[in-house]
Image (cartoon, grey):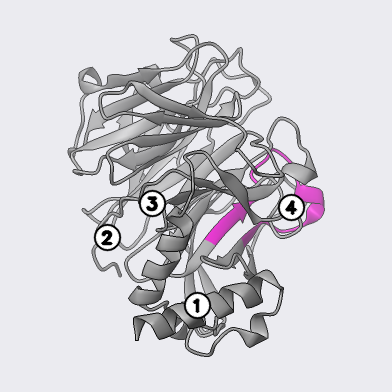
Amino acid sequence: MLNNLSEQFQAGRDSLQAGNSDSFPETLRDRLPAETDNAIPANIQTLEEASELHDAKIGDGSVFAEPEASPPFPEGIVADRNRIYVAGPAAFGDNGGRTSEVRVFHRITGKPLATIPIQGERLSEIHGVAGLTVDSQHRVYVVSNQLGIIRLSPQGDRYKQEIYSPILPEIACNPNLPPSLPCSLPNEITFAPDGYLYWSDSFQNTIFRVPPGGGVAEPWFHSDQLAGSTSAPFPVGPNGIKLSPDETEMYIAVTTSARAPGGVIYRLPFVDAPKEKDLKIVHQYTQGEMPDGIAFGKSGKLYVALQSPSGISILNPDGTERARLTGPDNSPIAYDAPADFAFDKRGSVLVTNHALFSGNPASFAVLKVFVDDRGVEVNVPHLP
């Protein structure tokens, strides 16, 4: 049986590489739009993993989503079952009067599956979307700077949109920010096993949390130690947030630090009311090094997207830097201010090329980079 499946898989792979998805064997064919029909059998995933690992080297890259398929200024990315969701644009602009989007791709083939336009934006004003996450019921959550957190619930080949949490309250405006910038910059989100959705505000130096089922966000942790540098091009403070694999600590990436020459990775006890004195430095980057999104691997290593210099920093559990990936090797598109990660379950991470500083449309892409690791998933409880 395994040999037969292997032959079918190879035939399907050859067909996809030749651009002929119709000849992909029926037992393996992508059968969208029905989400529940689109799960990939475990034995097929195992075969895919074997092919990914063969002769791959750490840092080897390829293009998962080409510039014409990716949203502009892509930032948020998340994997759920066999789908990859990518959000954009994440930029200070009106996007030419076009709506913000979440684009959907097939996790294995990279085939574009859907584009979800965000409803209710004021298109003549600055608008955009940033962080993405999912819950255990396969609903997708996206941060909108105008609307708050939007929940996208799959219904056949469509997605129901609703406001899960309104825009963040302005309670800790930073007096050192230039007057041209807003008080609040809602950025990254991540679920925790307590059912709360944690939410970073890069200008208010605060991590908020949203109660299970949604509602108004409340401050969970605030500290001026998280403040961004006002001398930086974008004075972004707290950005990427993730729970440690053992779920005892929250890790926070500060992109530009007002208290250090470069960005900083902090950790904080994951308790109901953490104290500022418990905030500890995990890794201090040097002048001009700007961390953005972060993700833990099952290995315990922390993957850090560096906006500048463009690349991936891999940290050991003790905070020392294990590797710095540039390039990526063998990819026709180079890193351009990468922003965030999603693990593909086959040893690689998918990386959004934010291209925030260059604004180069040829860089807007999702890259696939081999790291020989798997992602850590949070056990999110059932939510209303």
**Who comes first in sequence, dot 4 or dot 2?**
4
Estimate the x, y position of residue 285 in percent, counting from the top left.
45, 17
Query: Closer to us: mark 4 or mark 2?
Result: 4
Task: Look at the numbered disc 1 and give the secondary structure of its residue.
Answer: helix
Residue on which disc 3 sits: 216
Q: Residue furthest front?
A: 3
Q: Residues within 10 Å of mark 4 (few under 14, many from 20)?
A: some
In this view, 321 is above or below 112: above
Q: CA distance from mark 2 to mark 1?
A: 33 Å
295 or 48, which is in the foreground?
48
Comes first in the chain, label 2 or label 1: 1
Q: Nearer the viewer, mark 3 or mark 1?
A: 1
Q: Which residue is mark 1?
A: 9
Judge depth for marks 4 and 3 and give the one in front. Answer: 4
* Residue at the image point whose x is 41% and y is 36% from the top: 303
Looking at the image, tell me whether mark 3 or mark 1 is earlier in sequence order. Answer: 1
Q: Nearer the viewer, mark 4 or mark 1?
A: 1
Task: Please tell me whether mark 2 or mark 1 is closer to you in this view.
Answer: 1
Q: Quadrant of residue 104?
A: bottom right
- Image location (x, y in percent) of residue 191: 33, 52
Q: Could you tell me residue 350's position as x and y percent?
A: 52, 50
Q: Earlier in the sequence, mark 4 or mark 3?
A: 4
Q: Is residue 281 visible?
A: yes
What residue do we see at 35% from left, 63% from top?
135
Q: Which mark is residue 380?
A: 2
Name the residue beneath numbered marker 4: 67
Q: Position of residue 267 (x, y in %)?
A: 28, 28
Question: Start and end of the magenta stretch?
Answer: 85-102
**What's the distance in space between the residues labelled 3 and 1, CA to CA?**
48 Å
